[in-house]
Amino acid sequence: MGKTTVKVRLLEYSPNPEKIVTMAARLCYSASDIDGLEANVVAADQQSFVQKLLDLGHYSTIEHVSFTFGIEGVSRSLLAQITRHRIASFSVQSQRYVGETRQQNQNGIFDYVVPDSIMALGPEAMTEFAEQMAQIQKWYDGWVEKLGGGRGAYEDARFVLPNAAETKIMVTMNARELRHFFQLRCCRRAQWEIRRVAEQMLALVKEVAPVLFADAGPGCLVGPCPEGKLSCGNRAEVRKQYGLNSVGEVNQ
């Protein structure tokens, strides 16, 4: 197929995530049974209580809710970064079992990701990059043929495929790890591709758990920039991007 773009879907998530967090927190300090706790949790209570937990930094109860994403149109380079977040579960399309031969791909070439910096150089650079990917396709097909074809050949022929080769991922994280992930990967110092993925993931979870993720994003949203001397220096601009005013409150 050739050049591709990132796409993120929220596949599943814990039903009523903010209700679950509220119940878990109240359970720690209540003599009530589970049915009683659930009966006494109302929507308005959830919002104020979850916000209080976040303000106090009591994050253990938000680990009870999880979110599963389907991510495609990303490079193998991104895979190396996202799997560093070890408090998560990952399933990845395998180059060992899924071939990338010309016959298996629309337009006769594997899907690949083109960096923004190369696209910015204009049509000639894009053509050069596409030609390089086409040459790699020929090398890959050649090795598959020499190695006898089929899955056994894919296993070793894949060694000539580039970091640009597209892959598909399913990832599940709990809310606490997601907030940590957003703090690191929505930052402007994060690599552009994983930042793009993180921003899409954040937009999706805000739709279903707005209180849990109201202040989620790069670290400078809730305090001084954690990057120190490496800061981008645009904290006010970043906060505005995420809908926060000068003192960190969400703009209405």
Image (tube, helix red, strand yellow):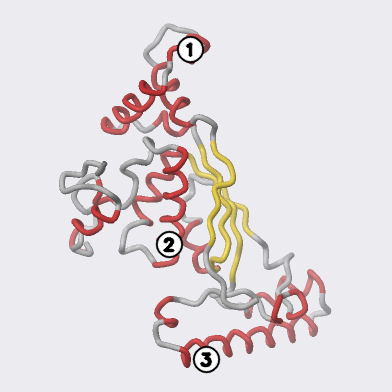
Mark found first going from the N terminus, 2 or 1: 1
Where is the C terminus found, in terms of image quarters? top left
Q: Residue at x 52, y 91 (%)?
A: 128
Q: Residue at x 52, y 87 (%)?
A: 129
Residue furthest out toward the top: 31
Amino acid at pointer 3:
Glu
* Mark 2 vs mark 3, CA separation in Å: 25 Å
The residue indicated by pointer 2 is 196
Kindly state the secondary structure of the residue where label 2 is placed: helix
Q: Where does residue 138 sit, x and y in percent of width and height?
A: 69, 87
Label 1 CA crowd tier, 10 Å (few <14, some 14–19, many 20+): few
Kindly state the secondary structure of the residue where label 3 is placed: helix
The reply to whether dot 2 and dot 3 touch (C-beta < 8 Å) is: no
Residue furthest out toward the left: 246
* Mark 3 vs mark 1, CA separation in Å: 64 Å
Q: Examine the image and state in which quarter residue 73 appears.
A: bottom right
The residue indicated by pointer 3 is 128
Kindly state the secondary structure of the residue where label 1 is placed: helix
Q: Where does residue 20 sit, x and y in percent of width and height?
A: 47, 26
Q: Residue at x 71, y 67 (%)?
A: 96
Specify whether residue 163 is in view: no
Give the total of numbered labels: 3
Specify whether residue 78 is in view: yes
Where is the N terminus found, in terms of image quarters? bottom right
Left or right of 23 in this view: 184: left
Residue 83's mark? none
The residue indicated by pointer 1 is 39
Amino acid at pointer 1:
Ala
Mark found first going from the N terminus, 3 or 1: 1
Q: Where does residue 23 sit, x and y in percent of width and height?
A: 44, 20
